[in-house]
Amino acid sequence: MAPRLPARCWRQIQLRTSSQSPSTSTRIVRAFSSTPLQSVKYGWSTLPKQDKPRRFNQTSLGLPAPTTGPAAALARRARTTPLRTGVLAIKKGMTAFMGKSGTRIPCTVLQLDEVQTVANKTRRKNGYWAVQVGLGTRNPVAVGAPMLGYFEAKGVSPKQHLAEFAVRGEEGLLPVGVQLMPDWFHVGQWVDVRSNSRGQGFAGGMKRHGFKGQEASHGNSLNHRTIGSAGPSQGSGSRVLPGKKMPGRMGNERVTVQNLPVLMVDNELGIVVVKGAVAGPKGAVVKIQDAVKKPPPPVEFIEQTRKLLDERFPHAEEQLEAARKRHLELKEARRAKRIEEIMAVGVVEGQAQGQAEVVA
Amino acid sequence: MNVAPISRRPLASLKGTVRKVRQQRLLARSMATASEPTSTPTNSPSPLPDHNFFTFPDRKTSRIRTAFAVYSLPRALPSASKTTLIKTDTSPLPPQTLAAPHPDPLPALCRKQISLLDPTGARTALFARTNRDAARVGDVLMVTHRRGGEPFAGVLVSIRRAGIDTAILLRGRLTKVPVEMWFKVYNRNVAGIEIVKRAKKRARRARLTYLRQPKHDVGDVQNVVFAWKKSRNVLSTKTRAPGEKQRFEPKARK
C-alpha cells in the first residue's frame, strides 16, 4: 500500500473541488480524503483509519454491556442521583416547633429568594444530566460582561448565586426561567442539605481533630495542647505520612446533612423548614435536594409540582427562544459596534434594523 | 431643583449650575439602565420579558462601549392563602411573575406559630411586657401539667423571652429538696399557669438568681399555695376569684 499523502496536500484539492462544484456535498469530498479527521488534527498519519476500537462490547452482538466508560459511570450513579432538581436557599436561622405530644422540635428556616432555573445540562452536550439553578438577584454593576451575556441569552435577570443539581435522567430537567417555590418540596419528605460550615480560622489539633492533648503536670512544660508525635521514626521511614491530621484551617468546608425531614413549606413567606440543624452561619447559601438515602416524594406529588410549574410559567419555552434570538442579534450588534444605535431605536424597530445591519 | 430663577440670579452662580449639570450628565452616562423604556409589551406579541440595557461606557470617549440586555420579570407577592403544617400549599401565582421574597420570614413564622399554639393570646399576655397584670419575677406561680401529676409551684426566678421558645424558671421544693424547673410557655404539655401570689415589691433585678443563696431562699411555697387554693374554693362557689382572669385552659386542669 502506497504511503498516504499529507493532509495539507489534499486540502488544496479539497478546497478546489468544493469551490468548483458547490452542489456536491462535503460527504463526497471527504470520501476522497484518506486522513482520519477526528484523531489527527495536524500533520498526517499512515495508520489505517479507526485503528483503535471505539466500542468494546456491542450489546447488539449479544455481548455484556461494558462496565467502564461514561455510560456505565452514569448507570452506576443512577441509584444515588435524585429524580428531580433541588433548590438554593438562604439559611435564615433556627427556631422550634412544639409537637402535639409536647415535644420541642428544633428546626432550621431556609428561605428561597427568587430561585429560578437557569440552564439544563444534558448527557449529549455535557455528559451528564443536571439543572442549573440561580438564587437572588445581583446588581448588573457587579456582574462581568461574560456573565451578563450568559444571563441575556437565558432571558433571566442576573442571579446572585448559581449552582447545579444533578438529576437522574432527562425527565428531571426543567424549562429555563421558571421559579421554584417552597411547594417544590413535600411536607414529610427527606432532604439532603449542603452548605459551607462556619470558618473557625487556624485551629490546633485538639479543637480541629479532637486530639487529647497532653498532661497538665508530671514535668510537662509548655506542651499542654500540642499534638505530640507526628509519626514513627527510623524503621517506618522517618517521614510524616500524607494526610496526617495536624493544626490548620478549620471549618468553611462543604458539609452535607443527610435525611432531614421537611416540617413545613410556606409560599407566602417563601420558606422551607427542615428539622434539625444545618451547617453554616445565618445568611449562608444552602443547597436542598431530595435525600439520596430515602425514598423520593410520591410520584403524584412530583407530577403535581411539574403541572404547577407549567401553570405558573406557561410561556417559558417561547421566552427562552425569544431571548436566545435577541441575544444573537445583540451579540452581532456588539461585534459590529452598533449596540448604541439599537438601544436608541428601541426593541421593536431595533430588531428589524439590527438584523438588516448584520446582513449588510 | 428650581430651574426658573436661574436667569435672575447673579452670574456668579453660573459656575455651580454648570457643575451640577455636568454631574447630572455623568450620572446619566453611568446609569445602569437606558433612559427610555425599551420594550412595549402591549404593542408587540413577542414573549420576551421586559428588559433594559446595562451599558459599559468607554473611558476615553463619552460613547457607550458595549451594552447587555438585563431582563426583569414582574414581581408579585405570593398569595396569602392558608398554609397548613400537614398539607402542601399549592396556590398558583399569576403566570409569568416572580414571587418576591418575604423581607424577614423568621419573626413572621414565629407569629404564625404562636397564633396557632395560643389562639386566645392568654399565654402571651401572661408574660407580655405591655400587660400591667402580667406575671413578674418574684411572683409565686403554679404550673399544671397536661399529663396529670402534681402541679409544680415556685417563685418565678426569670423569664426567658425568645418568641416561641419563651420559657420561665420556677424555684420551689419537691420533698423538701430545692428544685428549679424550666417551663416552655407555649408547650402543649403546660396546661395552665396561675399566679398564686404577687410579689410585695417590684424586683429590681431581671433574674433573681440570688434566691439560690441560703440567705435569700424563699423556701417552701406550699403553704401559700394551700391558702390560695382554699380562698379560691371558697370564692368560686359564689363569685370568681381575683386570680381567675390570669388562668387559661381551665378545662385541661382536671
Image (spheres, coloured by chain):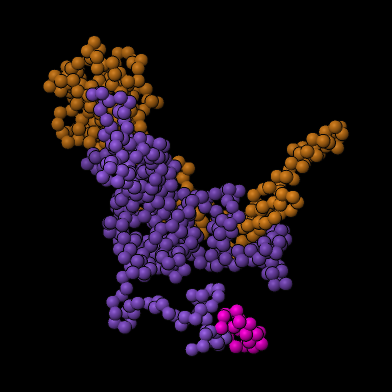
Q: Is residue B109 visible?
A: no
Q: Is residue A10 magenta?
A: yes
User: Which residues, given as a range, are shown in magenta?
Assistant: A5-26
Q: Position of residue A178 (x, y in %)?
A: 47, 59
Q: Residue at x 72, y 49 (%)?
A: B59
Q: Which is more toward the observer, A239 or B240? A: A239
Q: Residue at x 58, y 48 (%)?
A: A142
Q: Is residue A20 magenta?
A: yes
Residue at the top extreme, as displayed:
B215
Magenta span: helix, strand or loop, mainly? Answer: helix
Q: Residue at x 29, y 51 (%)?
A: A259
Residue at the left extreme, as displayed:
B175
Quarter of the view holding residue A79: bottom left
> Which chain is depicted purple?
A
Relative side of A116 to B115, left or right: right
Q: Which is more toward the observer, A196 or B250? A: A196
Q: Quadrant of the C terminus of chain B?
A: top left
Q: Position of residue A88 (x, y in %)?
A: 43, 52
Q: Which is more toward the observer, B66 or A261? A: B66
> Which chain is depicted orange?
B
Give the answer, above or below, for where B212 lies relative to B169.
Answer: above
Q: Position of residue A348 (x, y in %)?
A: 67, 65
Q: Quadrant of the N terminus of chain B?
A: top right
Q: Is residue A290 visible?
A: yes
